[in-house]
Image (cartoon, rainbow, N blue to C red):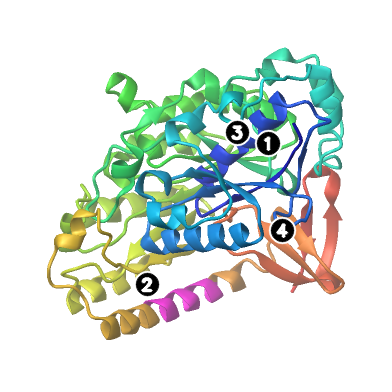
Amino acid sequence: MKFYFSAINLWCTKNLVDLEYVVWQILSWVNWKDVKFFEKPESKQVEYLIINTCWFLSSSRDEAEGTIRYYDDLWKKIILMGCYIPVRDDEFLKSLKNLYKIIPQKESEHINSEIFGWDNKSDLKSKLQNFKEWKLKDYLKNLDRLESDKKAFIWWSNSIRMPFNSPYWHEFVKISEWCDNRCSFCIIPKIRWDQKSRSIEDILNEIKTLVNMWIKEIEIISQDTTRYWSDLYWEVKFFELLEEIENLNLDFRYRIFYLYPDILTFSHLEKLKKFKKFIPYFDLPFQHISPKILKRMWRFYDNNHIIKLLDFIKTNFKDAFLHTNFIVWFPWESESDFKELVDFAKKYEFDSVSMFGYHDEQLAASSKLDQKVDDKEIIRRVDILSKILNEIYDKKEKFRVWKEFTWYVYDFDDKNVHIRWEYKAPELDELDVIPLENILSWEVEIGEKVRYKK
């Protein structure tokens, strides 16, 4: 069976990891003469298209349906997976001309060839030889040496996936799936169920494999990293996992996403101080600072806890990079609540803030709250906070212009090079655009290390 395919991931990096698993599993089942992966889904040679969907917000549902419709009109055979599946609009799907398969979420965890009707497999040597011909051949130069490492290629484990971000020297590693929190604005537990942690051994094997593929940064993600392992033994073991990662005798660094604040303690932060591979990037999704609003969000911490955590981080971590999320116009947010949020942003001068506009989601508890903020007030508050945050970003940029850091090259043309500072998170923080004439050195062989001036 000929299977010429491409894949699209919508929204979050947790979804991207799922898609990487699926693409690799497909390539590992099918005889390489019969299957080919294309980077561009619009390519005329692409017959099948996997679309990994999101439905965290209604806007993501609109994006999913718009993307599906676009490629359906291009007569691609659509294979759907992801968060849209359990809350899908069946009338919309019935209107499609080329819907080929819908993969239920639980089946996509350990997708098997029966879903696509395939049963032929190629041998290990064939997989490796053909993998070298894929688009990452310039980065995965010595893949032959992995052929003898059978442990790195266990075909039916979660440790193997197609490393889409390998050209940029980083990959995401998901340590757990889904979520046990019940924030009033969030629908993830309703469409993704309760938390399910992976084993430490499985995570370490995946990291070893990725680093052997010349990955320089490991991005640790989940819906709530701080609660890792609590679903298995009613005990949090996230920092024990980090200790095991630190003990790996490999050259890499790692970043942590989504350190949920409520169970984060000073003793946890003290441990982070001792870790050598840890990038001091603190992704702390506070959402707000007003105790009244936090209570209605069903966030189980208060402003005192937030302030103590931030003061400790700023005092104990040199060059700490602070990222957070704000929901600016949550129901019941008064002018004084908003002012408290603005003053909070000014005081702690976050390096990066993801600002979300509140709107009702039909499955979220917050949709039942009264005292919604009207649209004109929403726009006014967003403009005020956005201006303040941009002023903070500009000031911080001036302080780091003449410092020497590691940067990773993402793209370049005749005039500019697009680079990511090592302290900035991929997919989340903006790239810097530097004129080529300002580049002082560019050492590709050690991970696109760049020095530049302004």
* Dot 3 crowding, Cα within 10 Å, few <14, some 14–19, many 20+: many
Q: Amino acid at mark 1?
A: Met
Q: Amino acid at mark 3?
A: Tyr
* Dot 1 crowding, Cα within 10 Å, few <14, some 14–19, many 20+: some
In depth, the one of 276 and 175 nearer the eye is: 175
Residue beneath label 2, please? 346
Is the C terminus in the top left, top right, bottom left or bottom right quadrant? bottom right
Question: In what element is the residue under mark 1?
Answer: loop
Q: Amino acid at mark 2?
A: Lys
Instruction: Check the image and name the residue furthest to the left.
Output: 370
* Dot 4 crowding, Cα within 10 Å, few <14, some 14–19, many 20+: some
Residue beneath label 1, please? 162
Residue beneath label 3, please? 21
Which residues make up the magenta segment? 385-395
**Residue 341 position (above or below residue 223):** below
Q: Earlier in the sequence, mark 2 or mark 3?
A: 3
Distance from label 2 to label 4 (Cα)?
45 Å
Residue 328 percent across, percent down from the top left: 30, 70
Quarter of the image where one finds residue 154: top right
Quarter of the image where one finds residue 399: bottom right
Q: Earlier in the sequence, mark 1 or mark 2?
A: 1
Q: Amino acid at mark 4?
A: Glu
Is residue 247 among what the camera can see?
A: no
Mark 2 or mark 3, which is nearer to you?
3
Residue beneath label 4, please? 42
Q: Which mark is residue 260?
A: none
Mark 1 or mark 2, which is nearer to you?
1
359 left or right of 430 in image: left
341 left or right of 167 in image: left
Distance from label 1 to label 4 (Cα)?
20 Å
